Image (cartoon, rainbow, N blue to C red):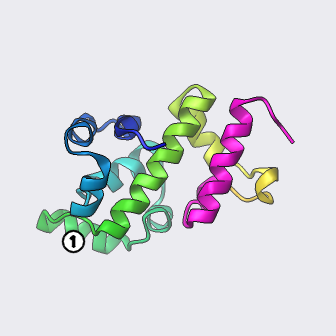
Amino acid sequence: MLSSDIFSTIGDRSLSQKARQVGLQAMIRTGLPPRSAFSIQNTIGASNQALEKIIGLSYRTLQRHKEKGSNLSPVVSDRIVRFLNVFNDASKTLGAVESGVAWMNRPCQPLGNQKPIEMLDTVAGTSEVVDILGRIRHGVFS
């Protein structure tokens, strides 16, 4: 379930407030500001290359959006919201943002020893990661 507080996980209160006012769907359709991607990078300590994989956009293009003051495309914005939703879930499930970052960057046996963060580039992979978090939350460790 998507929540407007997903932006608070990366410390962006103004985006959280806007999401409550206009809704995430509307924000995705009009495009998120580039700062949302840079906030993810700062929060999780991602390299430029890792950020590119998360959002599906080259770092240089992201910088151009920032320089021009233009919003990201709906496709990139959707990927950012998908990532933030899972990251928020991991942080809440594990008790802290730092724990969520650590878990997402550690190989996970139920995911074929892939890192959860590497699975978020597709809807199917995201679904698997969300399923694992649900099992953790409910104490099912199979």
Q: Is residue 76 left or right of residue 21?
A: right
Q: Looking at the image, which is closer to me, 75 or 71?
A: 75
Q: Residue at x 21, y 68 (%)?
A: 65
User: Which element is circle 1 on?
Assistant: helix
Q: Position of residue 53 (x, y in %)?
A: 50, 67
Q: Is residue 29 above or below residue 93?
A: below
Q: Looking at the image, which is closer to me, 104 or 49?
A: 104
Q: Which residue is mark 1?
A: 64
Q: Is residue 55 above or below residue 97?
A: below
Q: Is residue 104 left or right of residue 114?
A: left
The amino acid marked with disc number 1 is Arg
Q: Position of residue 142 (x, y in %)?
A: 87, 42
Q: Is residue 129 magenta?
A: yes
Q: What secondary structure prevails in the magenta region?
A: helix
Classify mark 1: residues with Cα within 10 Å, few (<14), some (14-19) or many (20+): few
Question: Splitting the image into 4 quarters, where does residue 121 fall?
Answer: bottom right
Q: Position of residue 20 (x, y in %)?
A: 25, 37
Q: Position of residue 67 (x, y in %)?
A: 15, 66
Number of callouts: 1
Q: Which residues are magenta?
A: 116-142
Q: Is residue 110 magenta?
A: no
